[in-house]
Image (cartoon, helix red, strand yellow):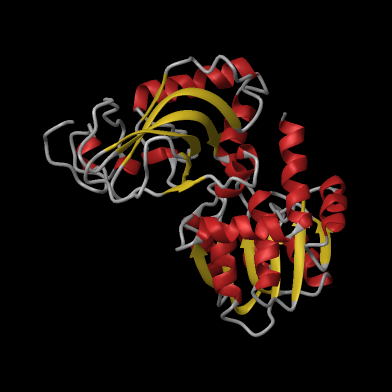
């Protein structure tokens, strides 16, 4: 064990010249030796944030080898996976190797876990050059190790679900938990989920209905996703619209029974802020879950439109969020089918 004092936020792992938290750091200390409140994980798979992976995919025009090389370079340079363009990372699955004597996480060596904190603040070392990954999907087979801090979060993987499926759910489990909390504050609200056919979007639709939504509207970018979402039964109305076109998005949601009392933004492309605001009723709430969101654009856009809406940043954490998301998956065949179809397509 390393004898020096540690901080539960991981501040002791920051190698920058100025005092910043690990997420904001340019480089982290990735030494294997643990401080007393840390946990080391033998990594089995990374799950890259959707916005990060899409940016890398576009940058390299779908060249999987180039994407793989850049991920390796980012991790080697920064000691963590943090896309310099999007600022986002993802999460991982692995097995607990060692637990410090003062770790508060309740983990034991041998536990198979998913981390519920971002890779942007998790010290990470890749030891296999990602040889088993073709660079063409968000889930990345990986051999290496990662370190969790005293204030990190991890969940032991359930025995009744495949690991890949659990990882996909836990990657976005903050979205349904916050969606449910917001919906519960209204009386049978109309809820629109932008990107309703995706991982966080489908779970958010299920959470909205579970929390008492009177009407749910799923917005997707093309007809193929619309067909899949309709077949899932998760939304009362499904519409096709480009979320980057504010007028088209507003009109599509309005025609489906909006404006929405609650609008949840789950798309992984930039430029959706104005449309989400226009699709939301006065005194409504917009929840932004995409790391592609420009929060300056959202704030200034609402001001410029004289829109009296509350805007929330989905921070990916709420107490009990992982268990809640997994229960939604178990209880909703439509959600599970969408997740399994996505995994099959990536495979």
Residue visible at 69% across and 56% down in the picture: 330
Choose top left, top right, bottom left or bottom right for residue 127: top left
The residue that appears at 30% across and 43% down in the rendered structure is 149
In the rendered image, residue 109, in percent from the top left (x then y), is placed at: 37, 36
- Of the pair 30 and 281, the residue shown nearer to us: 30
Q: Residue 193, image x and y in percent?
A: 69, 62
Examine the rendering and report whether any part of residue 168 can be seen.
Answer: yes
Q: Is residue 194 visible?
A: no
* Residue at image point 60% right, 38% down: 163
Of residues 128 and 287, the one nearer the viewer is 128
Q: Give the answer, above or below, for where 262 lies relative to 194.
A: below
Horizontal side of 241 relative to 292 (left or right) equals right
Single out the residue that lies furthest toward the left: 4
- Find residue 265 and report its image quarter: bottom right
User: Is residue 30 positioned above or below 339 on the image?
Assistant: above
Q: Nearer the viewer, residue 74 or 259?
A: 74
Residue 214, x across and y down, in percent: 74, 79
């Amino acid at each position: 064990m390393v004898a020096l004092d540690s901080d539960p936020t991981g501040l002791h792992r920051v190698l920058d010249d100025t005092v910043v938290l690990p997420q904001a750091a340019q480089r982290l200390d990735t030494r294997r030796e643990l401080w007393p409140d840390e946990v080391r994980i033998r990594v089995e798979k990374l799950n890259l944030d959707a916005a990060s992976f899409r940016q890398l995919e576009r940058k390299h025009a779908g060249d999987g080898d180039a994407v793989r090389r850049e991920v390796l370079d980012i991790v080697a340079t920064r000691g963590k996976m943090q896309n310099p363009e999007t600022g986002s990372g993802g999460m991982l699955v692995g097995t607990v190797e060692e637990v410090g004597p003062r770790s508060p996480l309740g983990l034991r060596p041998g536990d198979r876990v998913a981390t519920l904190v971002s890779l942007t603040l998790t010290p990470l070392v890749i030891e296999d050059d990602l040889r088993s990954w073709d660079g063409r999907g968000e889930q990345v087979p990986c051999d290496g190790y990662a370190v969790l801090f005293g204030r990190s979060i991890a969940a032991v993987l359930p025995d009744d679900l495949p690991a890949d499926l659990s990882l996909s759910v836990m990657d976005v489990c903050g979205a349904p938990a916050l969606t449910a909390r917001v919906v519960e504050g209204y009386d049978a609200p109309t809820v629109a989920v932008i990107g309703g056919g995706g991982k966080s979007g489908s779970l958010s639709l299920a959470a909205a209905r579970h929390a008492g939504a009177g009407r749910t509207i799923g917005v997707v970018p093309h007809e193929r996703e619309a067909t899949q979402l309709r077949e899932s039964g998760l939304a009362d109305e499904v519409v096709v619209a480009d979320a980057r076109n504010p007028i088209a998005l507003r009109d599509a949601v309005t025609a489906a029974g909006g404006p929405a009392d609650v609008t949840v933004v789950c798309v992984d492309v930039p430029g959706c802020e104005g449309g989400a605001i226009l699709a939301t009723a006065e005194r409504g709430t917009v929840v932004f879950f995409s790391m592609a969101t420009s929060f300056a654009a959202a704030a200034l856009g609402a001001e410029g439109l004289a829109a009296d809406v509350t805007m929330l940043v989905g921070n990916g954490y709420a107490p009990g969020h992982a268990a809640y998301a997994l229960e939604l998956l178990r209880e909703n065949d439509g959600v599970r089918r969408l997740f399994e179809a996505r995994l099959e397509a990536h495979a």
